[in-house]
Amino acid sequence: MQAHLSVVSAAAPARRLDRFLRTRLLAQLAGLTHGRLTLCDALGTVEFGQPTDLDVRVDVLDPAFYRQVAANGSVGAGEAWMEGLWLCDDLVGLVRLLVRNRALLDSMERGLARFGGLALRLWHTLHRNTRAGSRRNIAAHYDLGNEFFKLFLSRDLMYSSAYWAPDSNPDDDLETASTRKLALICQKLQLRPGDRVIEIGTGWGGFALYAARHHGCHVTTTTISREQYELTRARVAEAGLQDRITLLADDYRDLGGHYDKLVSIEMIEAIGAEYLDSFFAQVSQLLKADGLALIQAITIEDHRYTQALKAVDFIQRCVFPGSFLPSINALLEAKTRVSDLGLIAQEDFGCSYAHTLHVWRERFLARRADVRKQGFDESFIRAWDFYLAYCEGGFRERSIGVSHLLLAKPGWHSTGTPAT
């Protein structure tokens, strides 16, 4: 660790408590072994680690930053970012650096942060995904306004990972990669004209419109987001596909009927860990005896799943209440406990999600003025900047992934080889 005096446009930690907390954080950062982090404040500049492909600078503008981190660990750091208490020359790089130094990151959640963590867990418990709770949680994230999401999503309004195949052109734009993802899902499900498909989690209708238009199937799709429902209804009418798409506003637990195929694209993260069994039991119940299901899910590493369930992260606290990330094992164990679904194929394409998030963040930041015109303040903009960078860094370091799980009922017999 090297310290150098420098001039930073920031307030010096004047209180004894702030100086103590600064010293404590510096002692924790001294354990950084992968990459280099340069921390600057009004008292000077301190460098940690050795330069590698990750070389990140953090400027602390207000000593309240140290209090936030001490009280709530990584969540506190995110909230301090929202308040403008610190700056960083590479947010994605910082996330990657901390992931590579997992022991250091975990140490930030100890000490005083344990008490903050208890409060956060209580808050998270109050946002459980009961039927009423799910609608509140979904509204808090997805009902920010359709015009807001139009600012940075692809033209088909897919708020899920696009797909860049290993053999596809890396220069393909987001729209091309998003359409490729939809085509791949339909291929894996072996969609045929006349298939009855149930979709759990409509989004803004991107999959339903694509499947109905290109494969001649009938799609029943449900969302509990008021904003998504209204825009999807308008898009279906505009496409003249009311005879092929049935739009519902029902909780997935209340769906009925039997279908040839089922699809759910990044909706499972919103159900809550305690409802995994209920979700897969319903998936199995909704499928015919020879049905197929494809679940696209964001996942966490298996060995970190149990620990993650005991914590609350920045996204759960500040962006998407009630959310969680399952692990592959947790998903497979849940479907095995409550259903006769068999795993046919699995594909992870986390690199595609990192690129998707990079494009979303670029578009979002380029439209900041329009975000402000919609009534959102600087704290909101900084929260979404942090959220998108936080996720991109996680995917680039493979601490989180995104997978297609292709599941089949016992009566299903392949008419071709599913894409993997």
Image (cartoon, rainbow, N blue to C red):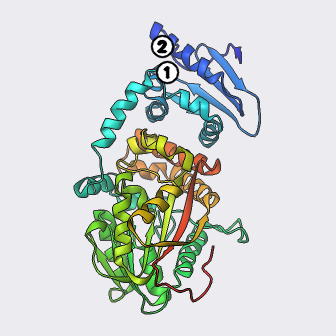
At numbered mark 2, what does the secondary structure look like: helix, strand or loop?
A: helix
Can residue 389 be seen by looking at this rendering?
Answer: no
Which residue occupies the extreme top position in the image?
16
Going by the numbered disc 1, the residue's amino acid type is Tyr
- Where residue 207 sits in the image (x, y, percent)? 45, 75
Q: Residue at x 64, y 15 (%)?
A: 44
Q: In which quarter of the image is the C terminus?
A: bottom right
Q: Quadrant of the N terminus?
A: top right
Q: Height in image: 38 above or below 165?
A: above
Mark 2–mark 1 contact, CB under 8 Å?
A: yes
Foreground: 352 or 174?
352
- Where residue 378 sits in the image (x, y, percent)? 42, 40
Q: Distance between the residues labelled 2 and 1?
A: 6 Å
At numbered mark 1, what does the secondary structure look like: helix, strand or loop?
A: helix
Left or right? Give the position of 386 relative to 136: right
- Where residue 205 sits in the image (x, y, percent)? 40, 73
Going by the numbered disc 2, the residue's amino acid type is Asp
Total numbered circles: 2
Foreground: 141 or 270?
270
Q: Give the label on residue 66, or none.
A: 1
Q: Height in image: 169 above or below 26?
A: below
Q: Earlier in the sequence, mark 2 or mark 1?
A: 2
Can residue 118 be seen by looking at this rendering?
Answer: yes
Q: Give the label on residue 18, or none.
A: 2
